[in-house]
Amino acid sequence: MAEKIHSKNKFKLMLYLSLTQESEQAKEKRAALAAETRTALADSLPDALVSLVGQQAAAGGAVKVFEALQNVTLNKQLLYEVLEMGLVEIFPEIASQQQQQHQPST
């Protein structure tokens, strides 16, 4: 019986280690991808923007935009807004219904 308990604990430990190792690998991949994306974003700034505000300010602004887009809650809200705009374009009657709902009743 002691061997059975030891075997279960050993399995749990191996499972835990494999899960934490995978998450560490995922974190490393995510960090590498974020660094690569920041570099690509800084390299792809429009020339007009760079000449208007300067290379350093444009790159700093691009990094700020990139970091703002890492917020899960804001990304969900952005997706909902874009989805709503698309639905209103496809089904214009939605916009008229929204206007009717927001008008104060007299």
Image (tube, grey):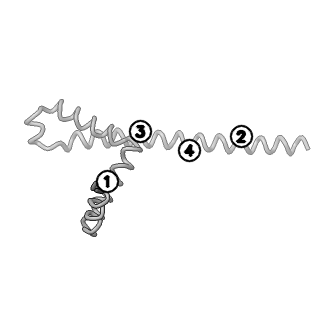
Q: Secondary structure at mark 3?
A: helix
Cβ atoms at labels 4 and 3 below 8 Å apart: no
Q: Is residue 79 above or below residue 24?
A: below
Disc 3 or 1, which lies upstream in sequence?
A: 3
Query: Which residue carries the number 3 mark?
Result: 31
Q: CA distance from mark 3 to mark 2?
A: 27 Å
Cβ atoms at labels 3 and 1 below 8 Å apart: no
Q: Amino acid at mark 3?
A: Ala
Query: Which residue carries the number 2 mark?
Result: 13
Q: Is residue 57 above or below residue 16?
A: above
Disc 3 or 2, which lies upstream in sequence?
A: 2
Query: Which residue carries the number 1 mark?
Result: 81
Quadrant where the C terminus lies?
bottom left
Which image quadrant for residue 44?
top left
Q: CA distance from mark 2 to mark 4?
A: 14 Å
Q: CA distance from mark 3 to mark 1?
A: 28 Å
In front: label 1 or label 2:
1
Query: Which residue carries the number 4 mark?
Result: 22
For disc 2, the neighbor class at 10 Å (few under 14, some 14 to 19, many from 20) is few
Q: Secondary structure at mark 4?
A: helix
Q: Which residue is drawn at the image coordinates 14% and 44% (left, top)? A: 46
Q: CA distance from mark 4 to mark 3?
A: 14 Å
Disc 1 or 4, which lies upstream in sequence?
A: 4
Q: Position of residue 40 (x, y in %)?
A: 26, 43
